[in-house]
Amino acid sequence: MASETEKPVLPPARPTLKEFAAFADNIGIRLVEWELDRCVIEFDVEEHTLNGTGVLHGGCMSTVIDTALAHAAIYCTVPGNYRSGATVTLTVNFILPVKHGSRVKIESKKTGGGRTMFMSVAEAKDESGRIVATGQGIGRYRDGCHTPEGLPRPDGVPDGKSPGRFS
Protein backbone atom coordinates (compact mmCIF):
# COMPACT_ATOMS: atom_id res chain seq x y z
CA MET A 1 0.00 0.00 0.00
CA ALA A 2 1.29 3.46 -0.86
CA SER A 3 2.13 5.92 1.89
CA GLU A 4 0.33 9.23 2.25
CA THR A 5 2.78 10.93 -0.13
CA GLU A 6 3.39 8.09 -2.61
CA LYS A 7 1.19 7.56 -5.63
CA PRO A 8 -0.25 4.03 -5.79
CA VAL A 9 1.11 1.68 -8.44
CA LEU A 10 -1.77 1.03 -10.84
CA PRO A 11 -2.19 -1.54 -13.60
CA PRO A 12 -2.45 -0.19 -17.16
CA ALA A 13 -5.67 1.69 -17.81
CA ARG A 14 -8.41 -0.13 -19.71
CA PRO A 15 -9.29 1.42 -23.09
CA THR A 16 -12.44 3.50 -23.45
CA LEU A 17 -15.45 2.27 -25.44
CA LYS A 18 -16.52 5.83 -26.30
CA GLU A 19 -14.89 9.17 -26.97
CA PHE A 20 -16.23 11.96 -24.76
CA ALA A 21 -16.68 15.69 -25.37
CA ALA A 22 -13.96 18.11 -24.26
CA PHE A 23 -14.99 18.57 -20.61
CA ALA A 24 -15.28 14.87 -19.73
CA ASP A 25 -12.29 14.04 -21.92
CA ASN A 26 -10.17 16.57 -19.99
CA ILE A 27 -10.96 14.70 -16.76
CA GLY A 28 -9.84 11.49 -18.46
CA ILE A 29 -13.07 9.53 -18.24
CA ARG A 30 -12.92 6.04 -19.74
CA LEU A 31 -16.14 4.09 -20.37
CA VAL A 32 -14.78 0.57 -19.86
CA GLU A 33 -17.96 -1.54 -19.61
CA TRP A 34 -21.34 -0.70 -21.15
CA GLU A 35 -24.47 -2.74 -21.54
CA LEU A 36 -28.20 -2.28 -21.20
CA ASP A 37 -28.98 -0.61 -17.83
CA ARG A 38 -25.35 -0.68 -16.60
CA CYS A 39 -21.99 0.95 -17.15
CA VAL A 40 -18.54 1.19 -15.57
CA ILE A 41 -16.45 4.34 -15.91
CA GLU A 42 -12.87 4.76 -14.70
CA PHE A 43 -10.50 7.69 -14.42
CA ASP A 44 -7.13 8.38 -12.87
CA VAL A 45 -6.82 11.24 -10.38
CA GLU A 46 -4.29 13.63 -11.89
CA GLU A 47 -2.98 17.04 -10.84
CA HIS A 48 -5.61 18.96 -12.83
CA THR A 49 -8.48 17.15 -11.00
CA LEU A 50 -7.37 18.13 -7.49
CA ASN A 51 -8.85 20.79 -5.22
CA GLY A 52 -6.86 23.26 -3.10
CA THR A 53 -6.24 20.69 -0.36
CA GLY A 54 -4.63 18.21 -2.77
CA VAL A 55 -7.46 15.66 -3.08
CA LEU A 56 -9.95 14.98 -5.86
CA HIS A 57 -12.22 17.97 -6.45
CA GLY A 58 -15.86 17.27 -5.58
CA GLY A 59 -17.03 18.84 -8.83
CA CYS A 60 -14.88 16.40 -10.76
CA MET A 61 -16.35 13.44 -8.89
CA SER A 62 -19.85 14.84 -9.43
CA THR A 63 -19.23 15.16 -13.17
CA VAL A 64 -18.06 11.57 -13.49
CA ILE A 65 -20.93 10.20 -11.40
CA ASP A 66 -23.40 12.27 -13.44
CA THR A 67 -21.92 10.83 -16.66
CA ALA A 68 -22.12 7.28 -15.30
CA LEU A 69 -25.74 7.70 -14.14
CA ALA A 70 -26.80 8.83 -17.61
CA HIS A 71 -24.80 6.20 -19.49
CA ALA A 72 -26.43 3.42 -17.46
CA ALA A 73 -29.73 4.55 -19.00
CA ILE A 74 -28.75 5.35 -22.60
CA TYR A 75 -27.03 2.21 -23.91
CA CYS A 76 -28.35 1.56 -27.42
CA THR A 77 -28.94 -2.01 -28.61
CA VAL A 78 -28.94 -1.11 -32.33
CA PRO A 79 -25.53 -0.29 -33.85
CA GLY A 80 -25.60 3.09 -35.58
CA ASN A 81 -28.60 4.37 -33.61
CA TYR A 82 -28.33 6.64 -30.58
CA ARG A 83 -29.98 7.37 -27.23
CA SER A 84 -29.67 10.60 -25.29
CA GLY A 85 -30.88 12.18 -22.08
CA ALA A 86 -30.30 15.03 -19.65
CA THR A 87 -29.91 15.16 -15.89
CA VAL A 88 -32.90 16.47 -13.91
CA THR A 89 -31.63 15.83 -10.38
CA LEU A 90 -28.24 14.70 -9.10
CA THR A 91 -27.24 13.78 -5.55
CA VAL A 92 -23.63 12.92 -4.72
CA ASN A 93 -22.46 11.68 -1.34
CA PHE A 94 -18.74 12.20 -0.69
CA ILE A 95 -17.56 9.48 1.70
CA LEU A 96 -13.74 9.52 1.60
CA PRO A 97 -11.11 11.85 0.12
CA VAL A 98 -9.39 10.52 -3.00
CA LYS A 99 -5.63 11.06 -3.34
CA HIS A 100 -3.60 12.11 -6.34
CA GLY A 101 -2.58 9.05 -8.36
CA SER A 102 -5.63 6.99 -7.41
CA ARG A 103 -7.83 5.23 -9.94
CA VAL A 104 -11.56 5.66 -9.40
CA LYS A 105 -14.05 3.13 -10.76
CA ILE A 106 -17.73 4.08 -10.91
CA GLU A 107 -20.35 1.39 -11.48
CA SER A 108 -23.81 2.68 -12.31
CA LYS A 109 -27.12 0.90 -12.78
CA LYS A 110 -30.45 2.09 -14.11
CA THR A 111 -33.05 1.32 -11.44
CA GLY A 112 -36.29 2.45 -13.05
CA GLY A 113 -38.11 4.85 -15.27
CA GLY A 114 -40.53 5.04 -18.15
CA ARG A 115 -41.12 6.85 -21.46
CA THR A 116 -39.69 10.19 -20.35
CA MET A 117 -37.69 9.71 -17.15
CA PHE A 118 -35.07 7.31 -15.79
CA MET A 119 -33.50 6.71 -12.38
CA SER A 120 -29.95 5.46 -11.78
CA VAL A 121 -27.59 4.82 -8.88
CA ALA A 122 -23.79 4.78 -8.79
CA GLU A 123 -21.01 3.70 -6.48
CA ALA A 124 -17.44 5.02 -6.81
CA LYS A 125 -14.52 3.00 -5.43
CA ASP A 126 -10.80 3.65 -5.31
CA GLU A 127 -8.16 1.15 -6.46
CA SER A 128 -8.28 -0.65 -3.11
CA GLY A 129 -12.05 -1.19 -3.37
CA ARG A 130 -13.06 1.39 -0.75
CA ILE A 131 -16.30 3.23 -1.50
CA VAL A 132 -15.33 6.89 -1.86
CA ALA A 133 -18.64 8.31 -3.14
CA THR A 134 -22.15 7.33 -4.14
CA GLY A 135 -24.68 9.01 -6.34
CA GLN A 136 -28.23 8.85 -7.50
CA GLY A 137 -30.04 10.77 -10.15
CA ILE A 138 -33.10 11.24 -12.27
CA GLY A 139 -32.80 12.01 -15.94
CA ARG A 140 -35.09 12.83 -18.83
CA TYR A 141 -34.81 10.95 -22.10
CA ARG A 142 -34.55 13.01 -25.24
CA ASP A 143 -37.75 12.60 -27.29
CA GLY A 144 -37.88 9.06 -28.72
CA CYS A 145 -34.80 7.82 -26.85
CA HIS A 146 -36.61 5.80 -24.17
CA THR A 147 -36.51 2.47 -26.03
CA PRO A 148 -33.34 0.35 -25.99
CA GLU A 149 -33.26 0.50 -29.82
CA GLY A 150 -32.93 4.29 -29.75
CA LEU A 151 -33.28 6.43 -32.87
CA PRO A 152 -31.52 6.39 -36.25
CA ARG A 153 -28.47 8.66 -36.22
CA PRO A 154 -29.01 11.64 -38.58
CA ASP A 155 -26.65 12.02 -41.54
CA GLY A 156 -23.48 13.87 -40.62
CA VAL A 157 -23.59 12.97 -36.89
CA PRO A 158 -20.61 10.69 -36.13
CA ASP A 159 -20.86 7.50 -34.08
CA GLY A 160 -20.63 8.17 -30.36
CA LYS A 161 -22.24 11.60 -30.71
CA SER A 162 -25.83 12.75 -30.34
CA PRO A 163 -27.40 15.35 -32.62
CA GLY A 164 -27.16 18.90 -31.28
CA ARG A 165 -30.12 20.14 -29.29
CA PHE A 166 -30.29 23.60 -30.82
CA SER A 167 -29.21 23.02 -34.40
Image (spheres, helix red, strand yellow):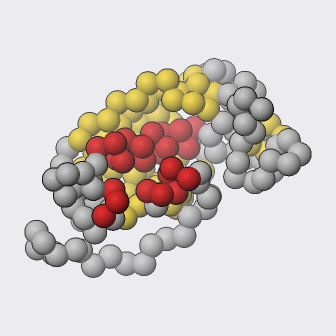
* Location of residue 123 in the rendering, given as x and y in whole percent from the top left corner: 35, 46
4 and 17: which one is in front? 4
Quarter holding the C terminus?
top right
| Residue visible at 28% across and 59% down in the picture | 126
* Location of residue 145 in the rendering, given as x and y in whole percent from the top left corner: 71, 31
Q: On the rendered structure, is 104 left or right of 139?
A: left
Q: Quadrant of residue 129?
A: bottom left
* Location of residue 17 in the rendering, given as x and y in whole percent from the top left corner: 61, 61
Quarter holding the N terminus?
bottom left
Q: On the rendered structure, is 149 left or right of 21?
A: right
| Residue visible at 85% across and 41% down in the picture | 154
63 and 77: which one is in front? 63
| Residue visible at 22% across and 74% down in the picture | 7
Q: Which residue, as the protein is rendered here, is positioned at the far right?
A: 155
Q: Which residue, as the protein is rendered here, is positioned at the far left?
A: 4
Q: On the rendered structure, is 113 left or right of 107?
A: right
Residue 17 visible in the picture: yes
Residue 42 visible in the picture: no
| Residue visible at 28% across and 69% down in the picture | 101
* Location of residue 66 in the rendering, given as x and y in whole percent from the top left corner: 45, 39
Number of numbered discs visible in the structure rendering: 0
Asked if 49 appears above or below 63 in the picture, the reply is below
Q: Quadrant of residue 155?
A: top right
